[in-house]
Image: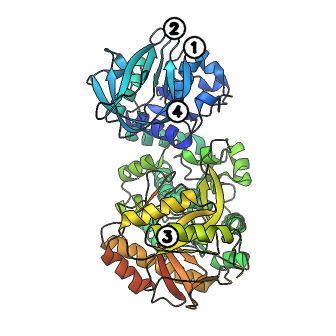
Amino acid sequence: MDHDKIAVIDFGGQYAHLIATKVRRQGVLAEIRQPEDPIEAYAGYRGIIVSGSPSLASQGEDSDYTKGVYDLDLPMLGLCFGHQEIAKHYGGQVIHGGRQWGKSNLHLTGEHDLFHGLGPVEQVWMSHYDSVSEVGPEFRELGYSTTTDGGEGHRFAAIGSDSLKRYGFQFHAEVDDTLNGDRMLANFVFRICGCTASWTMEGYIEEQAEALRVHVGDESVFLLVSGGVDSTVAAVLIGRALGPGRLHLLHIDNGLMRKDESRKVLGLFSDLGLDEHLHFVDGSDVFLGALEGAIEPEQKRRIIGDTFIDVFQAEARRLDIESHLLGQGTIYPDPIETGGTKRADTIKTHHNRVPIIEQMIAEGKVVEPLAELYKTEVRELGEWLGIPRDVVWRHPFPGPGLGVRLLCNDGQADRSGFETIEPEVAKVGSTFGLGALVLPIRSVGVKADLRAYEHPVMLSGEAPWERLVGATSVLTADVPGINRCIWNLGPAAPQSARPLPATVTRNRLDTLREADHIVMEALRRHDLYDEIWQCPTVLVPLDLDASGGELVVVRPVHSQRAMTAQPVELPAALLDELREGILALPGVTSLALDLTSKPPGTIEWE
Ligand code: XMP
């Protein structure tokens, strides 16, 4: 069935994805388009939404996009940067000024379809440095803003031209703090673009099942299952469409899984009735052999990815199922994030888009039934398909598994820049009444959209949560070379830190697995598992105060889509349980909690 659909032009990853998700919630398909896509790419859409961006429209930043979109006879709605670009294109002015941040009131200047069903004053959410100071001759002001306490705001908070069918909101209609933002987007989609809602999960399942049957014909599908929600949902959907007899599942234990994970994965697929062709390979020796001596994070990732392909191909040959189609649980944002566009927020290659897979895709040998869905939609689909709740709502787990949480080191302290960093860090620490030790290692972070390896700081001392995160914000924002802070959970404030030589070994992995298990169980006991997006546990080869063992860092975060994240305060009783369990593990002598937001720190440490 052909669905009415909307194109969302992506000037800044997370804004565009949020808009697309909100439009889909209305039952209308929304797809992401890149600003440089050719004009032909817009065939079949009923309207266009232009996203916000970190770029400044007033400075002409990011202005090199396909301007032909303005010639299309399709309604357009711009949000923030998109609003400013539309205003500019039709003869308006955008100035660098009028910065607003947070909630504002939008006052409508009259009735308009875009605001159908809404009141004369609406709470909206602003986040901008630039503003529209003048509109072109065909435009009019549909709304202006004031601060929430009635103070002066800005003109042209909403603009429109009904003859051109071009509209703009300075505010972000896609965020929840714009209380009726969903309604405004729905008004654009239904009243202005004339879309009909036809996109439902039930319909999606039927359509995908039919498409799979046509694509696969009489052949079979071979699917790798990690136990994560995406591959599990893909397996159940394919099994439903083709029957379990034509679905081969392979689970590879790469030695970097959580405690008991492989056993649980095999049990799950038996319970789901998909064990007719359920294959298992214990590849842990091969993986650990290949990783021997590796220290650099990117080198480890590459080895894990390459070994995975080798093990998978060898197994496919052994099972004589090489000719089968390859099933993948690729979800919508994956190829976009790997796309290497200049705005891509995530700078990593997804394993389902490595060259050998690209080649198979080109040959039509890959089926990806979730390729149009976002994570939340995959979970909804999982529930529809009757997959157990604890699988559907499992925390995301990276492809390279514990490999990216087991830090390695050559034993050399990395103290570059410490002469200037240390005094500054100590000064900030004392302002907040906290001990602050710069650690002679690095972890990854994102600053100005780029991944950068910088030093963490360990804060020590009893302090309310606000003070700890306050100190973290100041240290990561004001001291160059610092991108992360952790809070010491051990008894004494550490005075020295020395990296230990460490590589990927089974022993260290077992220690990390135990620590991770202790954390997961504690979160479940305290009913926090579902509330938290993800909680990596990291083993850091760092000896504090010559205690002789390694440091474990626990990193609980709240997040929506992993593009941004906030640290989570854990209850004191839970921290006590972690101290008791983790500090008793052999080889572990220190414990800390990560206090860093993303940005500037990423969720994982490498
Ligand atoms: P970061 O660390 O970039 O992580 O804030 C964002 C999300 O991506 C996951 N992640 C990965 N997933 N392969 C994956 O499949 C990887 O190499 C990888 N690195 C990070 C991370 O767990 C979080 O959910």
Q: Which residue is mark 2?
A: 137
The residue at the point 43 percent across, 43 percent down is: 205
Question: Where does residue 187 sit, x and y in percent of width and height?
Answer: 36, 23
Q: Which residue type does callout 3 highlight?
A: Gly
Mark 1 secondary-structure assignment? loop
Mark 4 secondary-structure assignment? loop
Horizontally, residue 44 falls left or right of residue 471, namely right
Disc nearer the start of the sequence (1/2): 1
Q: Is residue 228 visible?
A: no
Q: Is residue 421 visible?
A: yes
Question: Where does residue 93 sit, x and y in percent of width and height?
Answer: 55, 19
For mark 2, does the 10 Å Cα neighbourhood hold few (<14), some (14 to 19), or many (20 or more) residues? Answer: few
The residue at the point 69 percent across, 78 percent down is: 413
Q: Quadrant of ligand 1?
A: bottom right
Disc nearest the viewer among 2 and 3: 3
Q: Nearer the viewer, residue 547 or 219?
A: 547
Q: Which residue type does callout 2 highlight?
A: Pro
Specify the quadrant of the image occupied by residue 339.
top right
The residue at the point 65 percent across, 32 percent down is: 62
Residue 152 lies, with reference to residue 298, above or below; the image says above
Q: Which residue is mark 3?
A: 429
Disc nearer the start of the sequence (2/3): 2
Question: Where does residue 254 sit, x and y in percent of width and height?
Answer: 61, 72
Residue 581 lies, with reference to residue 44, above or below; the image says below
**Spatial distance from mark 1 to mark 2, Cα to Cα?**
7 Å
Q: Which residue is mark 4?
A: 51
Mark 2 secondary-structure assignment? loop
For mark 3, does the 10 Å Cα neighbourhood hold few (<14), some (14 to 19), or many (20 or more) residues? Answer: many
- The numbered disc on residue 91 is 1
Q: Which residue type does callout 1 highlight?
A: Gly
Q: Nearer the viewer, residue 84 or 252?
A: 84
